[in-house]
Amino acid sequence: GAGVSQSPSNKVTEKGKDVELRCDPISGHTALYWYRQRLGQGLEFLIYFQGNSAPDKSGLPSDRFSAERTGESVSTLTIQRTQQEDSAVYLCASSQYTLLGGGSTDTQYFGPGTRLTVL
Amino acid sequence: QKEVEQDPGPLSVPEGAIVSLNCTYSNSAFQYFMWYRQYSRKGPELLMYTYSSGNKEDGRFTAQVDKSSKYISLFIRDSQPSDSATYLCAISLRSYGQNFVFGPGTRLSVLP
């Protein structure tokens, strides 16, 4: 079946502009994550949505960052007044809580990411 | 001290070699250990998952967790050029939610 898709795949913008990144999760997945991946660094957690619960926004680096999700479908990550340090690959993942030998897990399926470059 | 440390490489090996990839972590409370493979311009994909200590084998891949040393390893036997990718370790306190901490990844090249 279809995996997680993200758009656009690449985005080049000027400093100070707003950008909107989109994630289409796997159908039926209740959880959705946004991560930021800077060159040579690990994935940095940004925000977590689980069903209809209030999202966990603890990873958002500043109030310029916000995200929304409509029900258990599409999510958008918005970065306002972009800065050069926002340049990174933004990854979205979705998951469905499952039992997996020896314990339960929340296997995350990642999209290909959006490569954001802020000039 | 970073929560998870991983040698970024790059690591180059000849085809057929045994590859050892490693991560160390600082918080002994972590219980869930994962290895992800990330091909260039793609998102990470889950390769191996281990709960608590011990070994887990899946085909040519073996994951090991040593909680006493706070050290996790991924071994790849009979490495293939198609194994060339970046390998990220991830650890977590819980099996779900925002607790996943990822290492920076080790870039592996398997030369034919």
Image: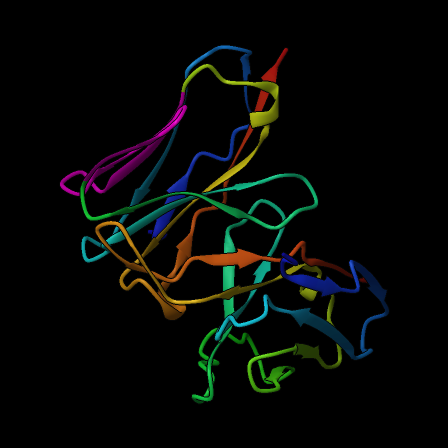
Q: Image point 85% across, 68% down: which residue? A: A13
Query: Between B35 and A31, which is closer to the camera in this rendering?
Result: A31
- Kindly report the secondary structure that dominates the magenta region of the rendered protein: strand
- In the rendered image, residue B65, in percent from the top left (x then y), is placed at 24, 38
Q: Image point 51% across, 61% down: which residue? A: A44
A39 vs A5: above or below: above
Would you identify the image quadrant in which residue A2 lies?
bottom right
Left or right position of B14 against A118 = left
Would you identify the image quadrant in which residue A7 lies?
bottom right
Colour theme: rainbow
The answer, for residue B69, to whether it is visible in the render is yes
- In the rendered image, residue B110, in percent from the top left (x then y), is placed at 58, 18
Tell whether position B34 is magenta.
no
- Assign the N terminus of chain A to one quadrant of the image: bottom right
The answer, for residue A119, to whether it is visible in the render is no
- Assign the C terminus of chain A to one quadrant of the image: bottom right
Left or right position of B79 against B23 = right
- In the rendered image, residue B57, in percent from the top left (x then y), is placed at 31, 31
Q: Image point 86% across, 69% down: which residue? A: A14
Query: Between B112 and A20, which is closer to the camera in this rendering?
Result: B112
Magenta range is B54-76
Q: Image point 28% across, 64% down: which residue? A: B94
Would you identify the image quadrant in which residue B54 lies?
top left
